[in-house]
Image (tube, rainbow, N blue to C red):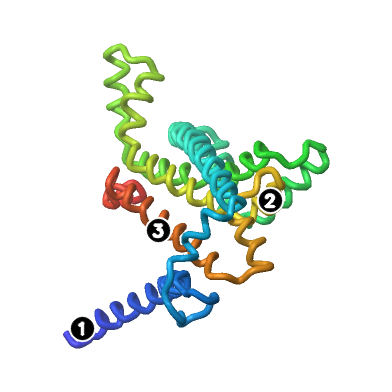
Amino acid sequence: MQKTLLGTTLWYIGTVIFFAFLLAPLLILITVSFNPTSMVFPPQGFTFKWYGTIFDKPDFLAAAVSSTILGVITAVATTALGVLAAIGLQRYTGAAKPLVASLLMSPLFIPAIIVALALFQIIFMIGIGNNIWVLLAAHIVVTIPYPVRNVMAQMENFDVRLEEAALSVGATPAQALRRVTLPLLKASIIPSLIIVFVLSWNNYTVSVFLANKDWTTLPLQLRAYLQYEYEPFVAAMSTILIIASVILLVIVDKTVGFGSVRKSGS
């Protein structure tokens, strides 16, 4: 009994320490964003002025818009390709299945900076130059494992008889996919969309190689700003990003529920 109580106590203490280690830097960053003077902790006062200055910096607003557009397109394209790839892999029984699956998952194991550098060398050799389409393709490459893995995990328990029933009453394969399969995979598709959007929106490693002056993302703009300035404005902008991430988590919970997300990965 005492050993069980001791083990439970140690588990709770370890959990608290783990989450404190993760959340303490974020809480400090949020606190610093209200500092009226400089980016130091503890703060020497309280002000909202740094949040107001966001609208006085058109470069940051343009970068935020660019990141949002890139993130939305990447999320839609990557999730669509990942869902189709996962469905195809789940039903394919050929000898090449493990190889194809490994290729799709390889960006999880290859550092993103290696992928970005390789793509940069390729476009330099071809001579097409950096543009939004190259950057979009790179973001799709590094994020496609997430929808593939999520959808394949849910399809482990997928009942193909539901599709067969739809086909037996006259539905075409495309109709069965659209009206039966995809709705049943909602618990893995919606989280994949949001995960890919967040990963693309916050990506720095790939963007620093492939972005150009006409299409600068917000992480690149923040990094460039920190090279010359060290104001709490950066903390204010980061706080807004943290709040946006929390909102996305709430959206996942309200649409499919975290219970459904866990079931899709089990």
How far apart are the alpha carbons under marks 3 and 1? 37 Å
Rendered location of residue 234, percent (x, y): 54, 65
Task: Tell me the residue at 75%/47% (across/down).
Answer: 120
Mark 2 — residue? 116
Dividing the picture into quadrants, the one containing residue 164 is: top left
**Res. 243 mark:** 3
Q: Determine whether, in the image, residue 124 is placed left or right of residue 198.
A: right
Question: In front: 74, or 142?
Answer: 74
Query: Does dot 3 land on a helix, a strand or a loop?
Result: helix
Q: Earlier in the sequence, mark 3 or mark 2?
A: 2
**Residue furthest to the bottom:** 2
Q: Residues within 10 Å of mark 2 (few under 14, many from 20)?
A: many
Amino acid beneath label 3: Ile
Residue at 70% x, 39% y: name it: 131
Where, quadrant-wise, is the N terminus in this rendering? bottom left
Instruction: Looking at this view, name the residue that lies furthest to the left.
Output: 1
At 45% from the left and 58% from the top, the residue drawn is: 240
In the picture of the structure, the residue carrying the numbered disc 1 is 5
Q: Up-down: is 178 above or below 86? A: above
Q: Are marks 3 and 1 in contact (CB under 8 Å)?
A: no
Q: Secondary structure at mark 1?
A: helix
Front of the two marks 3 and 1? 3
Decide if residue 106 is in sight here: no
Query: What is the C-alpha distance between the residues marked 1 and 2?
Result: 50 Å
Q: Which mark is residue 215?
A: none
